Each structure stands twice: as structure tokens, then as C-alpha cells.
Amino acid sequence: MKTLVLIFFCVLFSARTEAQQPFPKSANEDKEKIMGDSYWQLWNPQLQLEIDKNIEKYRKANGEISLTDLNPGTDVKIEQISHHFLFGAHIFNFDQLGADDLNKKYKDLYGTLFNSATIAFYWKTFEPEPGKPRYKTENIDEASYWNKLSEPWKEFHWRRPSPEKVIEFCEEKGIQMHAHPLIWGNTRWNHPEWISKEPNNVNQMERLFEKRINEITTYYKDRLPSWDIVNESVDPTPGKPRYGVIPEDYTYKSFKWAEKGFPSSVMFNINDSWRTVYPPFIKGLIDRGAKIDVIGLQMHIFSNAECGRIAKGEDVIANGTSWQPKNVIGYLEELDKLERPIHLSEITIPAPGKDDKSEKIQAIMAQNMYRLWFSWPSIFRITWWNVVDDCGAAGEPTTSGLFNRQMQPKQAFHALNNLINNEWKTNITIKSDKTGKIKFRGFKGSYRITWKDKNGKTQTTDYYLNN
């Protein structure tokens, strides 16, 4: 009996510690003044109403189903199982969190909160030795290897698991996969040490770019449905190269090499953060015949201080991007002129600290930004970057996760989970008409329809609601 009581207490305590604490969603609810008055003026009721209208318009559709062998007026349960829209995160910490229970909580997010995952293909760790790419899982990728480490971030492949086991996991759970990146010109973070950075060897670098693309396209074909073909190649200042030694016109060449190797069904993304030079750069590539199917747009806040200033309502340019809603809308309108779908490809919204107020700031900002992005018709996928605190790359904020390092959920998790699995999912019961037909309006995605036939036997059918 004592054992049962102890188990009940532990479960109850765990539920309480992980329960959501309320955070304000408007100026009227913000009695503690968590956000500045200027912030709430930007995210005013008129804007929120417009966001709601667009969500209703663009993210829902009308469904109609004809059922047989049921009495008129039978209750029909309509239960949404999954989203058509892609809510994702990178999956770079697969089996690397240092304990089996933490790894399980991490993996369980994919298929519950996230239906999309970005898989790491950074060249530096994918091919640390020339001619020996890490396609398949080795002992250094096993959870047992990481569970023994007290400082996992010192390992060369921290946040860079070999892709095969991750791909198999995503295939088994039906997670939409996105590969990142095929080519990235950053010689510090992406190029293997064995690639020369000397100016007189730039032609060799170009040949290695083409070789990598040929090998990967041949190996994967269409197994991974979308790729960041080139990552962060726009020069912030025209005429001033972003990186040191780099092949001339390598972005365009990389897209053309990839087009030769991948099947036409594979979606080609370009990926960068917002800069005024980004749209004309993309347009120039498209006009020259580059196969750019998707525009990737990063939005990172890499400074806790910047996050705090944004919470006050200041117009902060974080990583080249303003986070004020009117400016974000302006960015999206500019990109929409290119007539391509948009992937919010890398999202970093940190808590400015570890206290309760800071975590509420993160939750409020995530709530408002996701609502705005979800309401925008050309956006089809949003990818949160670092899921767990203190698991980012060097220099990234340590409080940008949806969970702390022990996989306990933060307020930002509860904010997104409520949107994705509650507010933006349709679960209703309606009555059939005399012909067995039911009509409803719901969020786009997969549904399970359940009813009882004339004999009282429960029947189910699947239904996919899109346009």
C-alpha cells in the first residue's frame, strides 16, 4: 500500500511540476506587466482579429462525407489526427541527451508536437575524413556512448548524429523530413578540415562541392523529400564576400548540379535570414533557371538582451531581422512576389533569463509569432531550432529551448502545444442528415470519422481534408 501511495504521489508531483502556468495573451491580461506597453500596442486587438480571420480563411476547409447504413440524426465524431501544415524542429540531439528517459521524451515530441524534422548534413562532421561519409550509424552515435559523457558538447559530432538512424526513425513515425544543408560556404562551421581554404585552391574547392552533391544525390535520390541546397550564401553587403575563399557563383552552380542528380520530385530550398538583398538575389537565380521550389527564411534572436528589448516593444534588428509584426508582414509580402512557398526554416526565440517572467516572455513571443506565421497563406512549414536548453551551437542562447536540459517543459512548449494540438485541431460531433451526409469546417489534415451503424456497431473511416 505504501508503494502505491508513493507512486501516486510521484505521478501527481510530476504532473504539477510540468503543468502550464498561465501567461497573458493580451494587454488586458498582462497585470504583471511582463511585456511593455509598446509591445502590446504592436500586437493590438485589431491585428489579432486579422490574424484570426486569416487562420480561418487559409488554414481551414469545408468537408463533406456521405456515410451509409446509419440512421438519420446519428452522432458522428470528427477527430483530427494530424495537420496538413508542417510544424517542425531540427532533430540534431537524437540520442545525445545523456539519459534514456530524456532521449525518450525528446523522441516522443516527433509525432505529437512536431510532424516535421530537419536532419543534419553538415559536411564537416558528415565527412570528417575524405571519402568516408557518415551515412550509417556507428557506435559513437548510440545513446550508450553519449550517456557516459559529462561534457557532450566537446565531441566533434555533438548535434550531428549520422543520418541513417534518424531517417529510419522519421520514416517509421511518418515524420516529414527536410535535409540541411547540402552546400554551405562557411569554412569555419561547415567545411571539413581537409578542404584547403587557400585562394589558389578555390578550383579544387569547387570540384569538391560538385563531388559532394553528386555523391549525396546518388545515395539518397528521393528518399528525403526536400533539401536546403545552399545555406546562407547571400552577401549582406553587395560586393563584400560573406566568406573568405569561395568558388565564384557557387550558389547557382550548386542548384544546377543538384538538379542533375536529384529526381524532379525533390523540393529545392534556398535558406537565409532576412536581408534587403535576399529577394533580388533569389529572383536573379530564378531568372537564370535555378530550380528554387521553396524560400527558406530564418528568424533568430541570438541575444538575451535583444529578446528583452523586443519584449519592451523596441524595434530590434536581430540577426538582420526586425521582429515587429508590421515589419515581418512587410518581409513576407516582399518574398511573396517571388511566387514560392515559404518555410520559416530556423526559429530561435530565447527566454531572456531562467526565471518565471523570462519564460513567460518567451511563451508570449512564440505564441504571437506562430499565430502570425500560421495565418500567412504562403507559409507551409515552421521549424523551431533548438528544442532543448543548452543544446545549441556555440554562441547560440542557452535558454532558447522549449524544454530545459532535464526535458521539463517550459511555458513556450505549453504555448505551442496548446496552439498545435488544441486551438488548431478540429474535434467535433455532428449529426448526419437523412441521407447520411455530414458537412463540417475544420483545420486541414487527417481525420478519423466514427459513428454507429443501424445495428449499433461502431464504424470508422479515414478522411483527409485539404482544399
Image: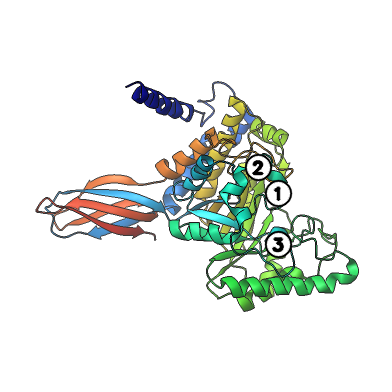
Image disc number at residue 326: none
Q: Looking at the picture, which amino acid does disc 3 mark?
A: Trp
Secondary element under disc 1, as helix, strand or loop, is: loop
Q: Looking at the picture, which amino acid does disc 1 mark?
A: Glu
Residue 193 appears in the figure: yes
Residue under pointer 2: 149
Residue 385 appears in the figure: no
The location of residue 428, given as percent across then percent down, is 29, 45
**Which of the 4 image quarters holds residue 122?**
bottom right
The location of residue 368, given as percent across then percent down, is 54, 39
Residue under pointer 1: 155
Apparent side of residue 198 relative to residue 451 in the rendered image (left or right)? right
> Looking at the image, which residue is at 57% across and 21% down?
32
**Which of the 4 image quarters holds residue 369?**
top right
The CA distance from mark 2 to mark 1 is: 9 Å
> Looking at the image, which residue is at 65% across and 54% down?
160
Residue under pointer 3: 123
> Looking at the image, which residue is at 67% across and 49% down?
158
Looking at this view, is 77 or 27 the one in front?
77
Looking at this view, is 437 or 381 the one in front?
381
Label 2 with label 1: CB-CB less than 8 Å? yes
Apparent side of residue 357 relative to residue 279 in the rendered image (left or right)? left
Q: Vertically, is 163 above or below 96?
A: below
Crowding near pointer 2: few (<14 within 10 Å), some, many (20+)?
some
